[in-house]
Image (cartoon, helix red, strand yellow):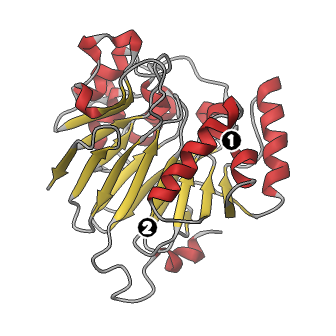
Amino acid sequence: MLRSLLFFGLCAGPLLCAGKPLDIYFIDVEGGQATLFVAPSGQTMLVDTGWRGFNNRDTDRILAAAKAAKIKQLDFVVITHYHRDHVGGVPQLADQMKIGTFVDHGPAMEDSKVVKEDYADYEKTVARAQHIVAKPGDVIPVKGLHVDVLTSAGDRIQTALPGAGQPNPLCSSTEKKDDDPSENARSLGMLISYGKFRILDLGDLTWNKEMELVCPNNLIGTVDVYLTTHHGGSSSNNPALVDAVHPRVAIMNNGARKGGNPPAWQIVKDSPGLQDLWQLHYAVEGGKEHNVPDSLIVSVDETGDNGGWIKLSAESDGSFSVTNSRNKYHKEYR
């Protein structure tokens, strides 16, 4: 379905993307997800919209990031799954910003009152825009980027991406957990590429589903940046996956008391080749032993009043920089 649109994921001309980076804003929505991609072509993709309510807190934070990025519309809004910290803010955001196309995994698959409420509100909003149901193997047509859909509605890609497919020795030493019946396991997961730069965002995909992507063979390959799955929670961040994708940098979109669990934090921190872990929040549960230095954290106290973001700017050669909006701490990764 989307494979035929692959052409539109490329720059329209040889000079269109020249000299322009891919900018990514990991927005602090208090333990939810809202990640804004601004492609070199100028097209935009927001992954999830944070929570509903809270006096429009998360929508206001997304709009602040959009203003900093100098964009006035969202060409694509990808909803990884229908939990409130990911889809809840859709109606509020759509009332304040033009959205071209929604992308999701199809109907909600969790039988809970909250999910049914949020999905019903989401359906009403989607009716005002274009809509794509993405399947594993599809490509979301963001001009200037290549966005591979790896997982959706509980399914995964069946063949390895180019350059991947090697046996994963960690599979034999990693045990499975109980299967997760919730929307988390149905998350729409993506690999986003700009030239040689690659970032992995699997939404809230849980332990066993992560394992299916890299066992017995690693279907993804390696990445430059890993957005920790499920906010750095212990029901995700399977070491067989984290070590296999071998990130240079990890970003943890945790809240003060959501995600950032010490066991998962340690798995990510110990990943071979990892240069830095950045966090959107100081994780209260972790204490000083399981949090990175304050310079790498956007919100360093429990209130989260700062409401900023981590900004990553990537070049097509694979180099990138990361900046903390709170203190302007900046680091280059060559």
As drawn, is 228 to the left or to the right of 317?
A: right
Residue 47: x and y, percent? 55, 49
As drawn, is 213 to the left or to the right of 55?
A: left
Q: Which residue is mark 2?
A: 39
Looking at the picture, which amino acid does disc 2 mark?
Ala
- Sequence-wise, the earlier of marks 1 and 2 is 2
Image quarter where the C terminus lies is bottom left
Q: Secondary structure at mark 2?
A: loop
Which numbered dot is residue 89? Answer: 1
Q: Estimate the spatial distance between the alpha carbons at disc 1 and disc 2, rounded to whole Å.
A: 23 Å
Residue 28: x and y, percent? 48, 36
| Disc nearest the viewer among 1 and 2 | 1
The crowding category of the residue bearing disc 2, from other C-alpha atoms within 10 Å (few below 14, some 14 to 19, many at least 20), is: many
Looking at the picture, which amino acid does disc 1 mark?
Gly
- Residue at x 40% of width, y 47% of height: 200
Q: Number of numbered discs present?
A: 2
Which numbered dot is residue 49? Answer: none
Residue 153: x and y, percent? 66, 43
Of 144 and 298, the residue lying toward us:
298
Of 7 and 172, the residue lying toward us:
7
